[in-house]
Amino acid sequence: MKILYDYQIMLEQKYGGISRCFCELMARYKKMYSDKVGIIAIGSQNYYLEKVMGYKALNFSQWWYEPGVKEKFVKINQIIISRLCKKGYVDILHSTWYDSYLLDINNCKQIITIHDMIQEKVPEYKADRKLIKIKRQLMEKADKIVTVSVHTKKDILEIYPEIPDNKIAVVYNGGCIQKIPKKCSFKLPEKYILYVGARGNYKNFDNFIKAVKIIMQRYEDLSLVCVGGGTFTGRERNMLGDIRYRTMQINADDKDLAYLYRHAVEFVFPSKYEGFGIPVVEAFSCYCPVVLSNASCFPEIAKGAALYFDPDDAEDMAEKMERVIIDKTLRRQLIKKGYSRSKLFTWERNARRMHQIYHSTANIK
């Protein structure tokens, strides 16, 4: 069988969770199965496509953002993919995002992965109405819809009850980190709370900072480390107030991130909505106790391996964070349960499940 992935997310992201998910899947799938797996992503400079897949990125950094350059590469990729499908060289086309060009392709089976329904479900998110419309059309056209959690599948069926339940398959992401380095590129504080990812709107960073300030005022030897999300804005620095002198923002690669999880006092994920939440699994696999919002997919993914708080209640968040600091028995239990839970979310499992879906969708045994 011939499986082709398209360019979309690889041209959109240099780094990013979705592009990483596809690259991890493709890499494992190629190792595990004899099916032909390929990707058309001319012009991509995606970090994971090069690191995980060995797909050599072209160096367009000097002029990539010049007017019209990206659009030309998009068109080139679309033409190549359309022709390959039309000539029968593709059995399964697995799209990586939601472009309308896919609506005109009819010569192969199509699979679409829905990572979340944030645009449709989260009021604080500035929804892209055009994207929502195309996303719905692609779900209707697709031969199979893949979601990364049962929670996301339920969201789809709630919003679009006309979509058949059996058209949607749940395939959990991986995220389990196999190796933790002994060194880190950064000089870190001795005791720190860890936050990973973007910090905008539904990520609930404002409430998180309110909770962290409560804790850090009680424990003067405690710091905050934020990974990713860009440098702090002026508003965020003002919000941090006095604790900004014990707070650092860094951009870490996968090795450093594993070290950061392993040595953190706790990892806190205050987001109000996620489709899956790979950092939760990463933290679990690095023996890091996890404190989570009691919201969206988190109880499904973490189950009893995390401590939960009300994401709208900063006092409750602070109380749960403090419990992990002072209750050594609880801390040991969370670490043990989390590590065990992480073994359920590997990229090998992800690839095995996708193999079943590809073959059943293409009617190949």
Image: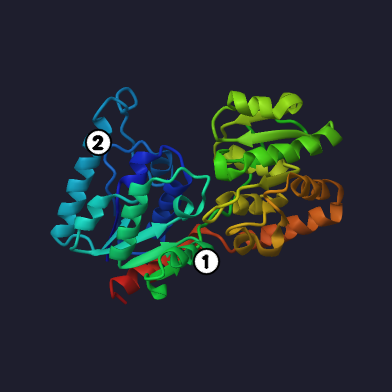
* Disc 2 residue type (three-letter): Glu
Q: Is residue 19 left or right of residue 124?
A: left
Give above or below for 108 relative to 127.
below
Q: Residues within 10 Å of mark 1 (few under 14, many from 20)?
A: some
Q: Can residue 303 be seen at all in this image of the molecule?
A: yes
Instruction: Using residue 326 as the reference point, say whether residue 69 is left or right of it.
Output: left
Asked whether residue 194 appears in the rendered view, the answer is: no
| Residue 230 position by quadrant | top right
Residue at horizontal 65%, vertical 25%?
A: 237
**Pointer 2: what residue?**
71
Circle 1 sits on which residue?
Answer: 150
Looking at the rendering, which quadrant does residue 351 occupy? bottom left
Q: Position of residue 97 (x, y in %)?
A: 35, 50
Q: Locate residue 95, reporting x and y percent.
A: 32, 55
The one nearer the camera, 193 or 35, is 193
The residue at the point 23 percent across, 44 percent down is 77
Question: In the visual, does 72 lie left or right of 64?
Answer: left
- Identify which amino acid the numbered label 1 is placed on: Val
Query: Residue 151: x and y, percent?
Result: 53, 63
Which image quadrant: the C terminus? Answer: bottom left
Q: Is residue 49 left or right of residue 173?
A: left
